[in-house]
Image: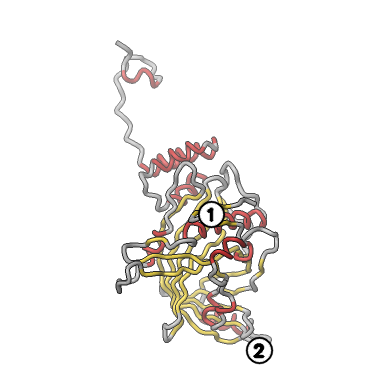
Amino acid sequence: MGGCYGSSYGHSSPCSTPRPAAEPMDAQSLFKRRFKQYLKSGDRADLQKALQALNGEHKGVINLMHQAAGIDAAVKDFSDFEIEAKFEIDLQRRNGKKAKEPAIEEIMDTFDMQFSPGALWIKDPVNAVATGQNRFFGTEDGEERVVIITKGGGVYLKEKGSVEPYSFGIPAEEYILRRRETRVATTLDACVAALLRHNKDGKLRDMGIIEKVKGDFFLINAQSGTEIGCSVTDSYKLPEREKRQLQLELEYAGQIPGFPAPTKQSERAIVEEMSRLYRGLLVTFGVEPVPINADWQLQLTPTVERKYDFVSGNGHQARIPADRDKILESLNLARRGRQIAYAGK
């Protein structure tokens, strides 16, 4: 017969007393070990093995990637402005019955991104949900300047710059916007000081207040390590709550270093990656309605409507006509029967 149990592990004596078996590695530790191997090898199979260690539980997977890469958060070169895109979410009844609307968690779960050997994006369904109120200040001609947010017992101040559209010639870039923004936890006195500072020209106006429920999940590109923060926002204008805006928002959140095909830290490269994601979501969730549950379905339509446009009553000027065939054509997508083909550019 062969040697003792421990002989293959390099013990000094081939017949020494076997050591107790090591405790099995927990799923998260196993994932991090395998994910580090993926960062070294760039082999897609290693990433697949890492994800298999989680047994389908991907909630928190990006945090585990951060830990394995030795970082606290994604690296973001462009931290003084946002790169973002939006869709309008159209909720539709499936059977005509007066069923209760789906919860925001159900809507987020509908954006299912099951990872497979050929898939590009991994979803982290953190599904963090918060409710707050946003009060908007700006000018009557559409210049948003200040947002005061009350949420979870805290006060937050956002100071906004103007929206800057891109002109690289990239498909869908008209839906991807750049804008400077700062957001800090603060006090009401500091908010008053900010309002005075932004009203030196005397044009600042209180444009109104919304109640907003916001649910977050994240996507990470399996090749480049680019993170995209995704939010489903359900907003009502107060006090009457008659006007509603339901959106899916995407925002560039940075990059995890070490992935095999990192995106160059240039705005053009990031916009190109956002464009591919935007068009992919439109194909999957915008061409035909997608079921949420037995009673409801959703469909995405591109939009550039801000919360400021919505609360000020000028949202119709920012909406994109919902002619999906024209949208598909403009985004370099073509209808073939009931199928949609992406024509790469």
Q: Which residue is mark 1?
A: 336
Residue 102 image-quadrant placement: bottom left
Q: Is residue 67 left or right of residue 27?
A: right
Q: Is residue 102 left or right of residue 271?
A: left
Q: Nearer the viewer, residue 196 or 61?
A: 61
- The secondary structure type at the circle numbered 1 is strand
54, above or below 299, in the image: above
Residue at 40% from the left image edge and 53% from the top image edge: 59
166, above or below 8, in the image: below
**Marked residue nearer the N-terminal end (2 or 1):** 2
Residue kind at label 2, given as amino acid type: Gly
Q: Is residue 277 left or right of residue 30?
A: right
Residue kind at label 1, given as amino acid type: Arg
Nearer to us of marks 2 and 1 is 1
Dot 1: few (<14), some (14–19), or many (≥20) neighbours within 10 Å?
A: few
Dot 2: few (<14), some (14–19), or many (≥20) neighbours within 10 Å?
A: few
Q: Nearer the viewer, residue 89 or 141?
A: 89
Counting from the top left corner in percent of width and height, residue 81 is at 62, 65
283, above or below 312, in the image: above
**Identity of the residue furthest to the front in this view:** 337
Residue 151 in view of the camera: no
Q: How is the image coloured?
A: secondary structure
Q: Which residue is mark 2?
A: 202
Q: Nearer the viewer, residue 239 or 329?
A: 329
Q: Nearer the viewer, residue 335 or 57?
A: 335
The N terminus lies in quadrant: top left
Residue 98 in view of the camera: yes
Distance from Cα at disc 2 to Cα at disc 1? 54 Å
